[in-house]
Amino acid sequence: MADTTFQITKEEFKLFHKIDRTLYYVLVIDLLRDPFESMQTLALWIWLERTCRCKDVINKILSLPHFLINQLANEGATCLKCIENNRLLSSTYASDIFLTQNLTKKELSLLFFHQNRDSATSGIRKIVNEVCFNALLDIMEKALKISFEQTLTERNMSMVPPPGDSSLIERFSQLGHGCDMSYLRMKGHNVPDEERTMFVTFSKGYPVAEWEIREFFKPYFGDCIDYILMQEVKSHEQALYARVVFVMPEIIEFILKDDSKAKFNIHGKHVWMRKFVPKKGNSFIP
């Protein structure tokens, strides 16, 4: 019997979800909404289409002006809060999500999402992991890049982030109600180590320890470093350079922006970083 199984390419998958990608682009690029929350909101709308037989939700939303799309996204975020928090239910009235009710032609209310939070949680998580990560990740990365470029410029890579700020990878780990960092590490490990690596140099007389490098980037990108190769020196000598291998190559783009190198101050010690370029014929691992 002939094998009838087949696989579609990433580009074919994105093309199949073109409408979903268009709406997500509007949310995170045009309306500048949070990329993580927007991915879950889009998954919620897809879940409504599939589970509650709400026809053409995505198409209907895309046909609306941006200010109404923004209001619907606000209602979606409220629904997600009712799903995520079993104690949070400010009202049972459908009027709290009037636009959503009108769009779906269903008698939906916050109470509905609260009562169906178990099935909604598993359904939304499944859509995020199986659809959104595969169809929307490039748009999310674009939105995050814009956001981080603005943030890094404003902070000038200072050591202390604003209170309550979430790191990139921590927020990825929260996405989908249980999707952990293994997804990101798996994604990064499909990329050769040298393409995820930065070459770091230190000033003589100002030693920088491996833990200081990790702690410097953690407030911005979370547990973002795969491993660090410090220069091998004798116990009484100072390492003058290191190779930092990140879990995702996109982090290097966030750090360098359009520059060839970047200069940081770690605990009063100057550190220079550039993208690692391996020499021909040399193994990446010393």
Image: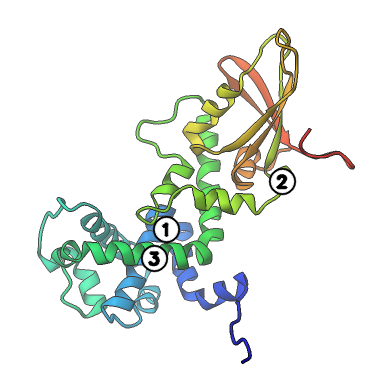
Judged from this view, the residue extending furthest toward the bottom is 1
Q: Residues within 10 Å of mark 2 (few under 14, many from 20)?
A: some
Image x and y of residue 264, in percent: 62, 25
On screen, residue 183 above or below 270: below
> Helix, strand or loop at disc 2?
helix
Q: Mark 1 near mark 2, Cβ–Cβ under 8 Å?
A: no
Check disc 3 and report the residue beneath it: 126
Question: In 3D space, how far apart are the residues under numbered discs 1 and 3 (Cα atoms)?
Answer: 26 Å
Question: In 3D space, how far apart are the residues under numbered discs 2 and 3 (Cα atoms)?
Answer: 31 Å
Asked whether, in this view, residue 268 is left or right of residue 284, the answer is left
Q: Tell which tag, 2 or 3, sits nearer the viewer.
A: 3
Residue occupying image coordinates x 54% and y 39%:
224
Check disc 2 and report the residue beneath it: 195
N-terminal of the pair, mark 1 or mark 2, is: 1
Asked whether, in this view, residue 160 is left or right of residue 78, the answer is right
Check disc 1 and report the residue beneath it: 31
Q: Quadrant of residue 227?
A: top right
Q: Amino acid at mark 1?
A: Leu
